[in-house]
Image: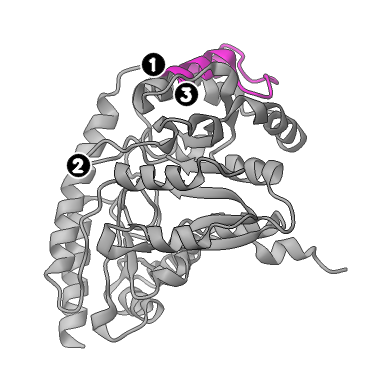
Amino acid sequence: MNLAGRISRLRGEGAFEVLVRARALEATGRDVVHMEIGEPDFPTPANIVAAGRKAIADGFTKYGPTQGEPELRQAVAEHVSATRGIPVSETQVVVTPGAKPILFYSMLALLEPGDEAMYPDPGFPIYEGVIGASGATPVPMPLLESRGFSIDLDRFADALSDRTRLIILNSPQNPTGGTIPPADLQAIADLVAERDLVVLSDEIYNLIAFDEKPTSIASIDGMADKTIILDGFSKAYSMTGWRIGYGVFPQWIVDAICLLQVSATSHTATFTQRAAIEALRGPQDSVQLMVEEFRRRRDVIVNGLNSIPGIRCARPGGAFYAFPNVQRTGMSSSELAERILQDAGVACLAGEAFGACGEGYLRFSYATALDRIEVAIGRIRRLLTRS
């Protein structure tokens, strides 16, 4: 029996494939600097861990509301209202086991065969795969290094059509670390304001920003009613394994999202939701300290990469990724990434893993200790200067 065609349209995450190869290399006795996985290397803050333990001890281990615990939804509404500058009701919030279900639920609720959905390229590979699996046509939006990896607005305008039903934005962005300037968001809003479509704004790195506070397109006049905000706790609160995220939806779509959630997962684990309440309402010192440490690491890796012949690296405004241009090395991104792994013992990702526009780039996650980043830079420099 054959698998359904939609399975072939899904894309995996290259980071996990490279991790397997890096672990195999380590098994032979090699030392490998891991810069492939987008996971903060900081522990979950102690107050959040304590809240999770207490929740289990207090019996928060049973079924809960499909939409999410009311107290957490209220905390999320307050947080999003404060950080995005828009009024949000707890009735608009749906809590999910990780943030990826927001992508699946939104696309299943909105897209049909014949529709088109636009996504950033290079971008998180799950976007394109889920669009295709939903039956819609993926339409890439090129990101330009010359514009700080913001969107090519001319090509964006040309790609809009009567079949466009969904536009995915991601800022700060994976894999580039780029942010979309307010002027670009306004230009996008002006182009879509009168169109029958929805914007899915992936803001999972919203709290990890270094130079300017990110702007949400939902804060632009007229956009709140046609924007879905995706966010969660994995990145800023280092809760990757807790699997808890959320979406803020226009009210008209909430019932459909809840129907998909109850059909797929019933609800999100209750004790992780209690921990998430503590994350939002407890001390924020750990977030601030983590962001400052990422800022230091960003400066070290960007300066280091720019000192290596054949590499040019823009300074990312957020997240924890560097996305250097390696075209002058004369190697494809996949060839160079493999050489850096095998010959230098540094695990990174080829830019093409994030879309066709990622060719000629590499992605380095600097969610690793500063001294290991320095080791990686030294190894890559030695590799390329002797090549």
In depth, the one of 133 and 137 nearer the eye is 137
Q: Position of residue 233 (x, y in %)?
A: 44, 33
Secondary structure beneath dot 1 equals helix
Q: Which residues are magenta?
A: 53-78
Q: Residue placed at 55% from the left, 35% from the top?
A: 226
Q: Is residue 63 magenta?
A: yes
Residue 65 sits above or below residue 338 on the image: above
Residue 103 sits above or below residue 69 on the image: below
Residue that protrudes farthest toward the front in the picture:
194
Residue 87 position by quadrant: top left
Q: Residue placed at 33% from the left, 63% from the top?
A: 144
Quarter of the image with the N terminus is bottom right
Quickly name the residue at label 1: 281
Sequence order check, earlier mark of 1 and 2:
2
Q: Amino acid at mark 3?
A: Ala
Mark 3–mark 1 Cα distance, whole angstroms, equals: 9 Å
Q: Position of residue 264 (x, y in %)?
A: 73, 38
Residue 309 sits above or below residue 119 on the image: below
Q: Is residue 339 magenta?
A: no
Residue 237 sits above or below residue 65 on the image: below
Position of 313 with respect to 190 (left or right) is: left
Secondary structure beneath dot 3 equals helix
Asked whether residue 270 appears in the rendered view, the answer is: yes
Quickly name the residue at label 3: 276
**Tag nearer the camera, 1 or 2:** 2
In depth, the one of 51 and 12 nearer the eye is 12
Q: Position of residue 224 (x, y in %)?
A: 49, 30
Quickly name the residue at label 2: 211
Quarter of the image with the C terminus is bottom left
